[in-house]
Each structure stands twice: as C-alpha cells, then as structure tokens.
Amino acid sequence: MISYRQQLAKIGYSPKEFVSYRSFFLPPLSLREAMRSMDFPGKFWEAIPGTEQDKDWTDEIQGCAFAHGRWFYVSNNPMTLHVFDGMSGKKVKSWKLTTVPPPDPPLPGFSFNHMGAIIIEGNYIYIDHWCGAQGAAGQILVMEGNGDTLNFVKWIPLENVNGRVGMIAINFARRMVITSGGELNIHRVYLHSLDTGKFANKTMELNPPITDKGYAQGGFWSPNNHLYISSGQGKIGDSSKGHQYIYSYSPLNGRLLNTLAVRSAAGRQELEGCCYAPVVREGQSVFIHVVLLENEVAKDDIFLKSFTADQPDLI
C-alpha cells in the first residue's frame, strides 16, 4: 500500500518531510482524495487539432464549456453566449449578455467591458468579467439555464487583491473560486468565496511560476483535484515558437504536474479559455478542450482543440 509520505514525494516533498493535508492551499475534503490527487497523468497529447471555424459568431471567442450535450462559447465582441448542439454542431441559440441587469448595489465605475472564461456546473453558468475601471478587481456573471433557456442570477464581485483579479477555476465542493491577477506571466493564485466574492486570505505561489509571457485566460478544477491554467498571448509575432500552453498544478502546494503544449501555427493566434469534459469527438475519447483564437483584422476565427492522456482517470 502506498503511504502518505510516498505520495508527498510526488509533489516535491522529501521522504522525511511530513505535512498535514489540512494545511495545504485548498485540500480536498478527505485525506484519501488528497493522496489520490498527488497522482497525475504521465503524458498528454493534442488528439484533435480542430478545423478552422470562420463564422459570423467566431469573433473574440474567449472560452468554451460543454454541458447538457452542448458546446457553450463566450464572445467578447459582441458580448454573447453562443450555444451549439454537441452532436450535429447546429446552433441552438445566441444570448446577448449585455441585457442582464448591472450589479446591485452598484459597483463604482462598472460598465460592460470584457467577458472572459466560462465554467458550467449543472444548470449554473459562471462567466468571468472585468469592467475596465481603474482599481476594479473583476466580477463573475452567474446565469442559469441549459442553452434553450438562460436566466440572470447574480453578479459576484471579486474582492481586490493587489489589483485586478479574475476567475481561473471553481472548486464547487469547497465553494471557492481560484483567481489570478491580470498581469503578464502568472506567479500566484488566490482564493475567493464563491458565495460572496470575498478574498479568503490565502495565496499560493506557483512552483515554478508561468513565465511564458502569457496572460491567464481561464482554467478549471479537474475531477482529480488538479488546477489547470491556460496561458495565452496574442499578436506575439513569432510563428516559430509554435506552441502556447495549459499548465497543470497541484492546488495542495502549487507544484507543477504537467504541461500541455497547444500548437499555434501563427503569431496572431492566441490561446483562450479551456475546460474539462469527457466526450467523444471524431471517434476519439478526449477530455480537455481549449479555444485557439486567430486574431484577424476584420473578424477572428477559432480552432476547438481537444486533448487526451495516458491515464485519463488521473486528470
């Protein structure tokens, strides 16, 4: 039987070190879950590079999610939630997000400015938003529906932590939002309450930090309690680089577990938000999906890329 100390070694601790799992940044609800989360896939690969979609709705797509047998995409221009049937690819509906009520009580300097990553849990849809006001931290727009219907629920204003923060992932079991700053490169993440948006006074340094000159574009909390972060950059002007990256970290202590290379064939291509969904695409079982946005002068196009792993049950 594998011991707790043996598992700790997988996330960087020496054999003689011992640490209570309750002292970690955001531990699972049980020691058994914590120990299992110290295991992770050995290899990921891009199973489906995606075909180029150059449609009237693909401009400024910021993130994707899969729920109710449907793909959900958030566009920032115009601020819209697009819903497509997962089997046929037929559009179900498009929802204008700027028709929802503004925050109440009012937030100083609020305006509809930038919709970002999307996360779905059951019928609840969470969309990252930044109003653009100086000193504003960010908000989460909460909607409810399955794509056929969509109703406004509330705004969650995220408390400032050294400047702007935005949603990366949500741990629904612990009712916590994992956030990061809006600066170039990603050195640390924070915890906010999903219910109130208040900062929980917990910060985790990433080891090693993300220093690929990208911005945090989104992410997700995986079934095996790992934190995935997509780091994207647009107009880098370096098509020779060839890749942008999704990073997998242990939310116990910030240790890097895996790096997923997302092929980007041109400098104008920008990695956006990612999601977890065990689905079959093009006859292949795939689990992690990400939008690669190609920034065009007139109107952007996108690629929906999908990944699999050698041990998908450990994602």
Image (cartoon, rainbow, N blue to C red):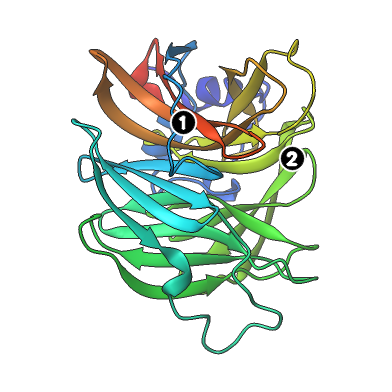
Q: Nearer the viewer, residue 283 or 221?
A: 283
x and y percentages locating residue 128 in the rendered image: 54, 57
Q: Nearer the viewer, residue 76 or 310?
A: 76
Indicate which disc residue 54 carries. Answer: 1
Identify the residue position indicated by label 2 in the image.
186
Q: Give the left or right position of residue 169, taking residue 210 as reference.
A: left
> Callout 1: helix, strand or loop?
loop
Determine the image quadrant of residue 84. top left
- Residue at the image point whose x is 80% and y is 62% from the top: 162
Q: Nearer the viewer, residue 28 or 105?
A: 105
* Label 1: few (<14), some (14–19) or many (≥20) C-alpha neighbours in 10 Å: some
* Label 2: few (<14), some (14–19) or many (≥20) C-alpha neighbours in 10 Å: many
x and y percentages locating residue 208 in the rendered image: 75, 28
- Eye-nearest disc, 2 or 1: 1
Q: Give the left or right position of residue 126, taking residue 281 as reference.
A: right
Using the rendered image of the protein, determine whether residue 11 is visible from the camera's viewpoint. no
Q: Is 266 rendered above or below residue 275?
A: above
Quadrant showing the N terminus: top left
Q: Is 160 rendered above or below residue 172?
A: below
x and y percentages locating residue 282 in the rendered image: 26, 15
Determine the image quadrant of residue 86. top left
